[in-house]
Amino acid sequence: MANSCFHSSIEGAQHGAKSLAQFLDYAKKSGASGAQPSNYMLQSGDGFKSAQEIRDTFEKAGMSLDGVSGHCPIWVQTTAWTGSPTIRPFIPESVAKKSPAEIEAWAENYVLHLLDLLSELNLKIFPMFWGVAFGWELATGYPWGFWAGPGYDLIAEGKERFVTKTQKIRDHARKLGIKLCHEIHPGTAAATADEFNMLVDICDGDETLAVNADPSHCWDGESWETRFEKVGSRIYAAHVKNFVIRPGFPLRTMQPDWTKRAMQFTDLPSGDLNLNRYVELLLSVGYPTRYCQVQGTATAPLVVEAESAHRDLDTTSANGILYVRDNLLIAPAAGSFEAGMGA
């Protein structure tokens, strides 16, 4: 769309069955201008593809490289200490057999090398989310007491744990000028805006701590507008995703079948969110200006992460790309609409 400060892009994590070239071919044919591949799409053997190979693949596809999605390895790095088996899908089988401390060290080393690759690619935007640094008790968010008692304080311990366990990654990212864009999300180190701002505070205002906005995770009381106004100055990445809440069904339940859950991700046009208002908020808090200044681009990506409890993934994402392209690539107002009155 002419004069828009945005362009249509797509998240690669859900499309991990495709190679990088296959993913970009699919994204291009679906109407995207750019893409945000997952870290797994960049792997080769025991390491990563070269920066030149990745650049060549994007150039051949005629797509912009809008960042690299690294949610899984960083979540593993800050969750391994809990001993949870839920980290296993995201690490090699040989690594999964190691102790929690060894897994954490492996994940930290993996992330540091990934940051080096991003730097070679001149990427400053790293969408991700921190793991369960405060423990599963606090990650539930349930208003149950006993978070502090004789000889323990889970919040104080969690603060110290987060600062310590993320230090090397934050230091390296800061040295490279990379923004670690946390997706405020249930089951992570910060599930609310206030919790994210607390992470910033305990890390002495660390400039590398940033936000990947995603309104589809604001379904448990905090509105997306409240959340992203509070952290607006640190938004450097943005997902576009939608959801519905089914009335009368419990939000917290041990139900693994997404088709039966109360909160369900949907195609972009039919969910509960007004995505036009969401994009206007991104504009209002300065996301596109901030992204373009850091990356040296003319436009900022609106990254489609369309998921559905019922619909085929590829068609849902393709529909999302077109929806963003045709409805959300707004052109910023040049001034107040009142300026021309009475002229």
Image (cartoon, grey):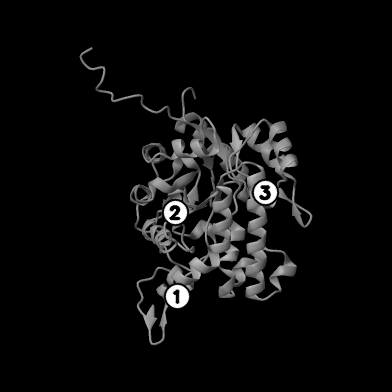
- For mark 3, give the secondary structure: helix
Front residue of 217 and 334: 334
CA–CA distance in space, label 2 to label 3 = 29 Å
Q: Is residue 188 above or below residue 276?
A: below
Q: Which residue is mark 3?
A: 117
CA–CA distance in space, label 3 to label 1 = 33 Å
Q: Residue at x 43, y 29 (%)?
A: 330
Choose the circle earlier in sequence order: 3 or 1. Answer: 3
Q: Residue furthest bottom?
A: 150
Q: Residue at x 43, y 50 (%)?
A: 244
Q: Residue at x 52, y 60 (%)?
A: 130
Q: Residue furthest right?
A: 45
Q: Is residue 42 above or below residue 188?
A: above
Q: Residues within 10 Å of mark 3 (few under 14, many from 20)?
A: some
Q: Residues within 10 Å of mark 1 (few under 14, many from 20)?
A: some
Q: Is residue 123 visible?
A: yes
- For mark 2, give the secondary structure: helix
Choose the circle earlier in sequence order: 2 or 3. Answer: 3
Identify residue type, mark 3: Leu
Front residue of 17 and 205: 205
Q: Is residue 3 above or below residue 291?
A: above
- For mark 1, give the secondary structure: helix
Nearer to us of marks 2 and 1 is 1
Q: Which residue is mark 1?
A: 157
Q: Is residue 110 above or below residue 211?
A: below
Q: Which residue is mark 2?
A: 217
